[in-house]
Amino acid sequence: MSQAANRYSKMLFELAQEQNNLEAIQATMTDIRKLIINLSDFRQFLSNPLLSYEERCAILKALFEGKIPDIAYRFLLFVTYKGRLNILKDIIESFDNMYLEQTHQMRVYVKTALPIKEEDKTSINQHLQDKFHQQMITQWILDPSLIGGFRIFAQGKLYDYSFKNQLSHFFQQTT
């Protein structure tokens, strides 16, 4: 992540805290990040060098004015003024990291070969909370290629408890 993205996100984070609006800004930034990920037209808009400042502002106004908290809308206009819309996704990711740290939460991705029972999900979440001492925000993903077992991606590390991985280790040890 760039230093510029971290500076912009820190500015927004501190402003949201000052105005007691952190939760709403977090939700808004998460929604905007989803737009960036899911809509190629929106991604192209953010990185299009041919649009003038006025055109960008008009598009942002049509998309967001009155629909998101005023702090978030003004922040988007400021980022546009500074010519940094192309790093908006990085800014949002940096903001999200600060928010998670502030609220003692952690995003975790768990891939399983098959759907698992709620009590197993609860058990895995509890184990992760005990290990990392943070509240888990878990995304469950089905991946039949694992054959069985599961993989956990947390704090930049992969914990692989899949049958596929176990078979691979077994074959490496026996050859």
Image: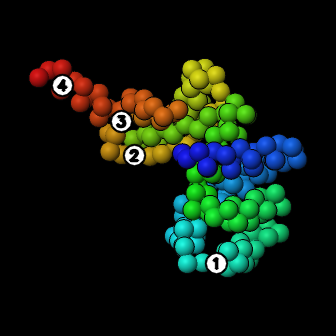
Mark positioned earlier in the residue sequence (2 or 3) = 2
Q: Is residue 119 left or right of residue 31?
A: left
Q: Which residue is mark 1?
A: 52
SS class of the residue under badge 3?
Answer: loop
Q: Which mark is residue 172?
A: 4
Q: Give neighbour class at mark 3: few <14, some 14-19, many 20+ (Cα, 10 Å).
A: some
Sequence-first tag of 4 and 2:
2
Q: Quadrant of the C terminus?
A: top left
Is residue 122 depicted above or below 99 in this figure? above
Q: Earlier in the sequence, mark 1 or mark 2?
A: 1
Alpha-carbon span between mark 1 and mark 2: 44 Å
Q: Earlier in the sequence, mark 1 or mark 3?
A: 1
Q: Is residue 24 left or right of residue 168?
A: right
- What kind of residue is marked 4? Gln
Which residue shows up at 53% across the image and 32% down it?
155
Visible residue check, residue 39 = no
Give percent across and percent down for residue 124: 54, 28
